[in-house]
Amino acid sequence: MSCRTAYILRDADGRCLVTAEKHSWWDLGRAEHVDGMLEMIRRTGIPTDDGRAADFVDGWHCRAVAIDMVERRVRHFQCGMSLHSAAHADSFAAWVAAAPVWSGWDVGYAWGGRQGLLDVVPQAAPAVAPDDPAPADVPLAALCARDEWFVGWDAGRSEITVKYAESSADWFHSCCSVVSVVRPDDVVLDYRLEYWDVVGWLTRHGEAVVPALSAEAPYPLPGESTVGRSAGAVLDTASRRLRYWTADSVPPAAHERLAAAWPGWRTERLPYGYPGHLACTGRTDHDALSSPEQLRGEGWDDALLAHRDAGRRRLAVPADTLRACRIVVVDD
């Protein structure tokens, strides 16, 4: 199986077309590639009000581009196999948006998946299949095991005591998601979940998540390589603000269910994944972040790294605004 890319175009004359191709290598950042892509859509496209186009854009398409030539807007999403994390996807989206070919355009990533393409070309709705997955049946007690490295938690001092090294939890967790609770006293408690579907977990359990986590000892922050393509959330209890991130799409219906499960909370997607998560909890340059050298070996280049760094710094809060837990290491 290989990637299939769907294309939606609302042309300058108002007609709306949909088409697809396999093995697509159009580069959205290069003008000559965009011109070739538009020519291909106009040549092979089916009108979206044609019966043949019904539900054309479906789950078989792992990449897609929607272009509105009238309002000068673009939304796109990429195959998850080519994007290594939520931060990688956001950095790629920022690189595309900054390309000269799109100067003066509204260009963004379709984090709502195929339904998110309709943000710019709502006329294509008949050609886009519904996407309304049920939330996963994830238990509330979804924390990673800690018997191998954990010693104790001193709530009064906000100290986590561990064996071996500050990063020893990473030795036993090959991958995890991260949820941080910001208490009213501005202390940040970090928790590791063994499930990737953080949005489904937050939707299924709602605000009960906060007391459930607060009753548990927190965890040391995982390294960025341990988080990988996982997901996370920051729950600010004082401002009642929930910010989540994931490398996967969150269809509009799923986001609406999440918001309904947290009444009275401001619910939004947090850009730049784990680096953004650290930045908005006062840890912009934390040692948990991978170095540029490490990231270059994982599909990053200098342009993407520049967008990653600029994005996370825009999210940063002063280091003295919030207080993280201290990690104490003892001999085994």
Image: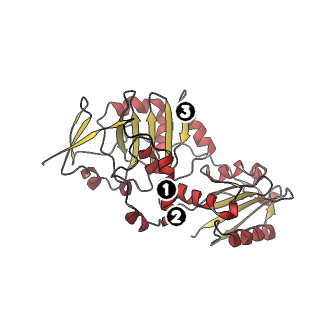
Is disc 3 surrounded by few (<14), some (14 to 19) or many (20+) residues within 10 Å?
Answer: few
Q: Is residue 83 visible?
A: no
| Residue at 50% in and 33% down | 241
As drawn, the residue found furthest toward the left would be: 331
Alpha-carbon distance for marks 1 and 3? Answer: 25 Å
Q: Identify residue for label 1.
A: 308
Alpha-carbon distance for marks 2 and 3? Answer: 32 Å
Q: Is residue 237 above or below residue 105?
A: above
Ranked by sequence position, the earlier of labels 1 and 3 is: 3
The answer to which image quadrant residue 100 occupies is bottom right
Ranked by sequence position, the earlier of labels 2 and 3 is: 3
| Residue at 45% in and 33% down | 236
Q: Is residue 169 visible?
A: yes
Q: Quadrant of the N terminus?
A: bottom right
Q: Amino acid at mark 1?
A: Arg
**Camera-nearest residue between 77 and 197:** 77
**Camera-nearest residue between 60 and 236:** 236
Provide residue 97's location: percent of width, then percent of height: 63, 58
Alpha-carbon distance for marks 2 and 1? Answer: 9 Å
| Residue at 38% in and 64% down | 294
Q: Identify residue for label 3.
A: 266
Q: Residue 303 got which mark?
A: 2
Task: Kindly check if marks 2 and 3 are in contact, taking CB atoms under 8 A apart as contact.
Answer: no
